[in-house]
């Protein structure tokens, strides 16, 4: 039996494996060196990309914290004068306007965008493909075009600036972002869940409401909050349409103020006190956006844990 085994030809698979191992042993030093070199380049590029971001955040914290105070956050702004150039007041109405405009824009955009995302995820018709292309194009549109759109179709017919025009501009901005995120979330729902619902005799609409949307809810909520954070920091769309207000205004049919607009106005002011206060306004805006961004991730992570 031993002689018979010794007369068998060598196994080609084992020969190939030994050849590969021998070749790998000869080149292990060079491959390790190349890997370390590329890793060093990637780390260096990452650190280099952090420099401008870190410098902006450092300047924002150093200069913005100096302007932040409790009266600054809840009082109305004052126009400096030659007598008292430091009388800038606060940004309470700008915070109020930002919350109202972005909140109402989200109320308009979320239902429309979620339905569009569900339709794109469940359909492959020509209409769905055309709508998908339009959504992707709108995602990359310059935001200033949405301000021009709101100015032409809201401000000019109403013959006045208003928070409503800002709501329309930001809602149009949010719809494609939420729709794209919702489509990806709905496509991530296992096909077996949909088939199980249909096998029980439920209609497509009932399966969508009771199975697909609840299963994709973490991804949808993440997309909504991230789009809201993006809309909250946009200046270009509202710069043309909401006007300016120095009073408390809850009615979106009137002129309103917002943090991005106030930052823009203060940064170009002739008064040094307002230019310094622009850093405080920007810091308050960044904190609000950061809270939304972190909140979206925490909510999505908690909902995923609960589902498991």
Image: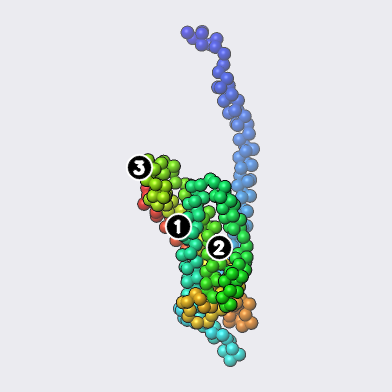
Is 176 situated above or below 271? above
Q: Which residue is mark 2?
A: 173
Dot 2 or dot 1: first in sequence order is 2
Q: Is 251 left or right of 13, judged from the image as shown? A: left
Q: Which residue is mark 1?
A: 221
Q: Position of residue 226 (x, y in %)?
A: 50, 60
Callout 1–callout 3 Cβ contact below 8 Å? no
Distance Cα–Cα, label 2 vs label 1: 17 Å
Badge 1 density bin: few <14, some 14–19, many ≥20, Cα 10 Å: many
Q: Is residue 130 visible?
A: yes
Q: Position of residue 297 (x, y in %)?
A: 46, 57
Q: Which residue is mark 3?
A: 200
Q: Residue at x 56, y 75 (%)?
A: 158
Q: Nearer the viewer, residue 161 or 17?
A: 161
Count neighbours of disc 3 (C-alpha within 10 A) and say few if under 14, some if 14 to 19, many if 20 or more: few
**Element type at marker 1?**
helix
Please state which of residues 150 and 286 is positioned toward the viewer in this rendering: 150
Q: Residue at x 60, y 65 (%)?
A: 146
């Amino acid at each position: 039996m031993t002689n018979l085994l010794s007369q068998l030809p060598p196994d080609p698979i084992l020969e190939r494996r030994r050849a590969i191992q021998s070749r790998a042993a000869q080149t292990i030093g060079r491959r390790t060196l190349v890997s370390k070199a590329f890793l060093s380049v990637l780390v260096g590029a990452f650190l280099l990309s952090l420099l401008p971001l870190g410098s902006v955040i450092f300047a924002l914290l150093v200069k913005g914290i100096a302007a932040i105070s409790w009266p600054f956050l809840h009082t109305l702004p004052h126009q400096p004068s030659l007598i008292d150039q430091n009388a800038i007041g606060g940004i309470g109405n700008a915070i109020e306007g930002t919350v109202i405009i972005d909140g109402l824009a989200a109320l308009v955009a979320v239902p429309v965008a979620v339905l569009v995302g569900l339709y794109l995820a469940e359909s492959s018709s020509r209409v769905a493909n055309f709508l998908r292309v339009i959504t992707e194009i709108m995602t990359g549109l310059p935001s200033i075009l949405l301000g021009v759109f709101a100015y032409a179709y809201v401000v000019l017919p109403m013959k006045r600036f208003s928070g409503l025009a800002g709501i329309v501009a930001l809602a149009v901005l949010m719809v494609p972002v939420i729709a794209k995120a919702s489509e990806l979330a709905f496509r991530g729902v296992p096909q077996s869940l949909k088939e199980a619902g249909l096998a029980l005799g439920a209609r497509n609409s009932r399966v969508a409401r009771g199975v697909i949307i609840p299963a994709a809810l973490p991804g949808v909520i993440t997309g909504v909050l991230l789009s809201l954070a993006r809309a909250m920091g946009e200046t270009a769309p509202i710069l043309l349409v909401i006007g300016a207000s120095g009073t408390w205004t809850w009615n979106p049919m009137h002129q309103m103020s917002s943090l991005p607009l106030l930052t823009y106005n203060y940064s170009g002011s002739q008064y040094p006190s307002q230019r310094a206060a622009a850093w405080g306004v920007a810091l308050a805006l960044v904190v609000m956006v950061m809270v939304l961004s972190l909140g979206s991730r925490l909510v999505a992570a908690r909902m995923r844990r609960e589902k498991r």
